[in-house]
Image (cartoon, rainbow, N blue to C red):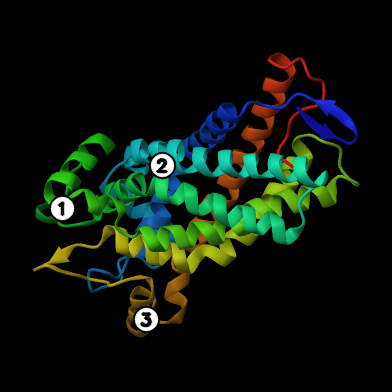
Amino acid sequence: MALVYGVEKKTVPTHMKFVMGGTSGMLATCIVQPLDLLKTRMQISGTLGTREYKNSFEVLSKVLKNEGILSLYNGLSAGLLRQATYTSAKMGVYQMELDWYRKNFGNYPSMVASMTMGIVAGAFGAMCGNPAEVALIRMMSDNRLMPEDRRNYKNVGDAFVRIVKDEGVVALWRGCLPTVGRAMVVNMVQLASYSLMKNQLHGYLSEGIPLHLTAALVSGLLTSVTSMPLDMAKTRIQQMKVIDGKPEYSGTIDVLKKVLKNEGAFAVWKGFTPYLMRMGPHTIFSFVFLEQMNKAYSKHMLSDSLSDSVP
């Protein structure tokens, strides 16, 4: 039970918060997966010694021409597993943190509290989702390699088995530090800005889809701008190959230094257009789906007219 505006109400069980968090992310991924592929191809363009694509439209044109329309969904199984692990964990943990805060302080969290909770939820989710992230990046970038260099994973399960067999279990957490770092930044901004924007807009918009869309739109834009360099570094590390026992990059800072030196300052924002187009809609769809599932569960399972929405 929770106290909202002085009214005691039933709340969604903890396990359902994780289930609905993951489901909302998986549904959103089914919609934006092609944009994620374009973003990934742009970010690793240049790692073969030459710049492969001038812009996102050229990526799309070449992928459709050389690989077919279905290739836009390469890595979907890994993407869905990533959402089932990463998003389930981060959304579930964040909602638990919000419930704890409201129970102990009787109010919505402050900006600092929201950002702190977002950092914790993001770090926890990233550690859980890193194996699927590694498989996803490799599957989406595979077709750009020469035939003899391709890994040719059949699906995410095959990717896991072969990574463990060829590189060891630890390889599933390759790039974990930049992934966790990115997730902490992303969720500090994404979750906190969504909650804060929603609270600020309550005086102008009633609870419902228009409010959720507006808050998620602002959240997606802010998240894209702040997290892009770390996302690029994470992508480069996760798809790199180890040659003669020596990896291409030693860490996030090494990636950023080499990119700045060899490709220029704007290269850290390479793929920003598809990244924004992916992050914005994914944020919007994820939060809208989550809000509607919370509302439906509260209405039909708890017989509660007050929807247990995300603050």
Residue located beneath label 2 in the image: 82
Report crowding for label 1: few under 14, some 14 to 19, many 20 or more residues within 10 A (C-alpha). Answer: few
Residue located beneath label 1 in the image: 167
User: Foreground residue, 132 or 44?
Assistant: 132
Residue 274 appears in the rendering = yes
Residue displayed at 56% across by 45% down: 282
Disc 1 is placed on an element classified as helix
Amino acid identity at mark 2: Arg
Residue located beneath label 3 in the image: 257
**The image quarter in which residue 113 lies:** bottom right
**The image quarter in which residue 5 lies:** top right
Disc 3 is placed on an element classified as helix
Tell me where residue 270 appears, x and y as whole percent: 44, 68
Name the side, left or right, on which 105 lies relative to 162: right
Q: Indicate the quadrant containing the C terminus: top left, top right, bottom left or bottom right.
A: top right
226 above or below 311?
Answer: below
Tally of marks: 3
**The image quarter in which residue 68 lies:** top left
Q: Indicate the quadrant containing the N terminus: top left, top right, bottom left or bottom right.
A: top right
Residue furthest out toward the bottom:
261
- Of marks 1 and 3, which one's residue comes earlier in the chain? 1
Amino acid identity at mark 3: Lys
Tell me where residue 231 appears, x and y as whole percent: 44, 62
